[in-house]
Amino acid sequence: MKYVAGLTLTRHYAVAALRLSAAGVNCLSWTQHTANARLHRTTGELPQARFERDERATLQVLASRPYRSVAPLQAPSAPQPGLPGLPDVQRRSLTIYSRIAGVRT
């Protein structure tokens, strides 16, 4: 059974990755052909033209390695109990509510 569950999860993640990849392609296409092709109502310019003229020259190369944190790393603190004054919410399976309501599943 673990093998079947593993295959199902693997397939699920593969499909999700393909959908995400397709969404990225669609988003990039929309940005290039729609968003950057329209005149901006406030500036009266194409966003891509304004970016190339005013912004691109100020961009710099990404850092070659991650920045070192200035703050010392701290061990995570113990979880705090619920905030005072807030109710304690119990989490239950929906089947329990069906049983309470007398609904057959």
Image (cartoon, helix red, strand yellow):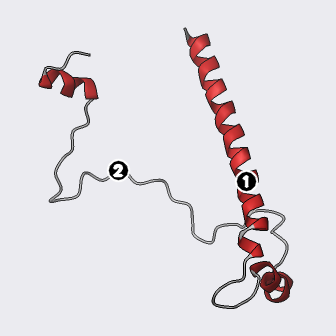
Q: Position of residue 66 (x, y in %)?
A: 74, 63
Up the image or down, 94 lies above or below 30; here it is above
Foreground of the two, 97 or 87: 97
Q: Few, some or many C-alpha atoms within 10 Å of disc 1 (few <14, some 14-19, many ≥20)? A: few
The mark closer to the camera, 2 or 1, is: 1
Up the image or down, 12 lies above or below 44; here it is above
Foreground of the two, 40 or 86: 40
Residue 26 image label: 1
Q: Quadrant of residue 5?
A: top right
- Secondary structure under the numbered disc 1 in the rendered image: helix
Residue 101 image label: none
Q: Are marks 2 and 1 in contact (CB under 8 Å)?
A: no
Q: Residue at x 25, y 31 (%)?
A: 92
The amino acid beneath tag 1 is Asn
Q: Indicate left or right for 27 with 73 as reference.
A: right
Foreground of the two, 27 or 63: 27
| Quarter occupied by the C terminus | top left
- Secondary structure under the numbered disc 2 in the rendered image: loop
Residue 79 image label: 2
Up the image or down, 97 lies above or below 23; here it is above
Gap in Å between the C-alphas at discs 2 and 1? Answer: 41 Å
Tell me which numbered mark, 2 or 1, is placed earlier along the sequence: 1
Q: Residue at x 17, y 59 (%)?
A: 84
Q: Quadrant of residue 22?
A: top right
Q: Residue at x 18, y 20 (%)?
A: 103
Q: Position of residue 34 (x, y in %)?
A: 73, 68
Residue projecting furthest to the top? 1
Q: Quadrant of residue 1?
A: top right
Q: Few, some or many C-alpha atoms within 10 Å of disc 2 (few <14, some 14-19, many ≥20)? A: few
The amino acid beneath tag 2 is Pro
Q: Indicate left or right for 104 with 60 as reference.
A: left
Q: Position of residue 52 (x, y in %)?
A: 84, 82
